[in-house]
Image: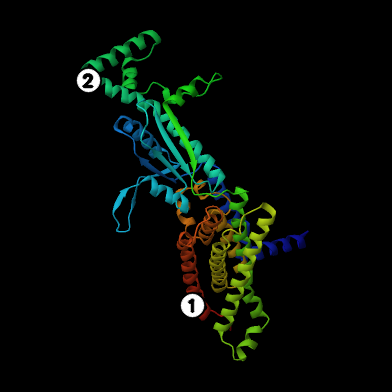
Amino acid sequence: MRQTLVLLEKEFRLFAKDRTAISLTFLVPAVLIYIFGHVFGINRTESGPTGIPIAVVKQVDEAHANTADAIIAALDREKSFRVLRTSKDASGIEHSLTEPEVRRMLTDGDLRFALIFPEQTNASLGIRVRFLNNPQNEIETQTATGLVQKTVFTSVPQAIFQSLQEQGRRFVGSAAFEKFDHDLAVTIARTFGGDPAEIEKQIRAGDFGLSQLTTNDSGEASNFLDQLVKIDSEQVGVREVKNPQATRSVGGWAMMFLLFALSGAATSLFDEKKAGMYQRLLAAPVRRTHILWSKYLFGVILGLIQLVVLFIAGHFLYGIDIMSNFGNLLLVCLAAAIACVAFGMLLAAVAPTSAAASGLGTFLILTMSAIGGAWFPTSFMPEFIQHLSRLTIVYWAMDGFLRVLYNGAGMLAILPGVAILLGMSALVTLVSIWRFKRGQIFD
């Protein structure tokens, strides 16, 4: 028994010295639990997405302007959305968004959702709106559509009643209308009970509980709301995709596997050093830069081949259309492969051992995949994580894949994302070279 306890103590001492084992045992699961907890609304007062950009274009006449403003104000209060009203032109001058501009942003994949308030063709109190969406992500689109409908249907009745009140005040005068509100409140309180002052306050605020109407078995509430507001949904900037979910998901899976593969290839530098290969190579007319460039080019070629093979597999397994825009898909794959190789080289440059590089790589790859949109929409995470996601290569690779496969985007539309991937690669590569020059991996 004593021998067993001594050996058990030895195991714990070895484990305590192994930072890689500790991080994989505790740190990685804790980070992923935190991310998944936010995605699924655990320990949050409100579950669901946050900060989804939605553009608003208001073209209605004066008679319907109050109703449109009430809907926009309700969208502003909805934490799930970030309302966009303006944009800047090439000279930096800010202007209100127009419908053609919004449609172009949706087509290019720069925007997912927009609410258009067109000129009304009738003089009724009701209002017609158009909900434009680019359904790159089915889960996000369904969630945003439901939230838009809820926001519109709960804000329109109260806005229309307030508009009626304003028209009544202009018609009979404020004093007479306020007396009417007071007498109405007293009558309601006498008949049904309640505080007359509170009822009068609610009347003047336009709150008669209309926003709480729900569809009953006979559909009366639904018919009532349908007469007040009409929402026309339209998909913009998306091709006919045979398997939308697979079209979105395959790119994320491919990026995660690519990161693991290329990180492993880069950290093989440690194994080659242990085998004494560098001493023999450096004794020949070979420099350190030659070794690094050979590793780098091998990783890029391997990564490009791996991504293409995985997309071809997605084509045959799930019917993903990769051929109609194959040239631009290849360009994004190349930029993603270069970025993944740069990441793997950085791991080899900063980690002291192969085990440390492997542990750090696992932690960073899983974290980048989770927050970068490879597993689920980034809008389902807190806003500060959404900002962090833009610092990952997974986010920009996913953005490029979706633009190419979902939107059929041309080269001009994908160039900004490709440039960001290449910029990240250049910065990380410079850090890696600096570390390799100061490190002992070739010595």
Q: Nearer the viewer, residue 32 or 25?
A: 32
As shown in the figure, which amino acid type bears the numbered disc 2? Ser
Secondary structure of residue under mark 1: helix
User: From the image, which quarter does the N terminus lie in?
Assistant: bottom right
In the rendered image, residue 188, in percent from the top left (x then y), is placed at 36, 12
Determine contact: label 2, label 1, CB under 8 Å: no
Res 256 visible? yes
Res 23 visible? no
Q: Quick check: 309 left or right of 148?
A: right
Residue 325, compared with residue 343, is above or below; it is above
Which residue in the rendered view is the most extreme toward the front?
121
Residue pointed to by mark 2:
174
Q: Nearer the viewer, residue 352 or 218?
A: 218
Residue pointed to by mark 1:
434
Q: Quick check: 404 left or right of 167?
A: right
Residue 105, compared with residue 224, is above or below; it is below
Residue 114, compared with residue 209, is above or below; it is below
Q: Which one is in front in this view, the residue at disc 2 or the one at disc 1?
A: 2
- Residue at the spot x=55%, y=74% of the render? 349
Q: Marks 2 and 1, how far apart in space?
A: 76 Å
Which residue in the rendered view is the most extreme toward the right?
1
Q: Nearer the viewer, residue 276 or 370?
A: 370
Secondary structure of residue under mark 2: helix
Q: Which image quadrant is residue 358 in?
A: bottom right
In the rendered image, residue 74, in percent from the top left (x then y), is placed at 39, 35
User: How would you rate the neighbour count of disc 1 (Cα within 10 Å): few for under 14, some for 14-19, many for 20 or more?
Assistant: few
User: From the image, which quarter does the C terminus lie in?
Assistant: bottom right
Q: Nearer the viewer, residue 70 or 201?
A: 70
As shown in the figure, which amino acid type bears the numbered disc 1? Trp
In the rendered image, residue 191, in percent from the top left (x then y), is placed at 38, 8
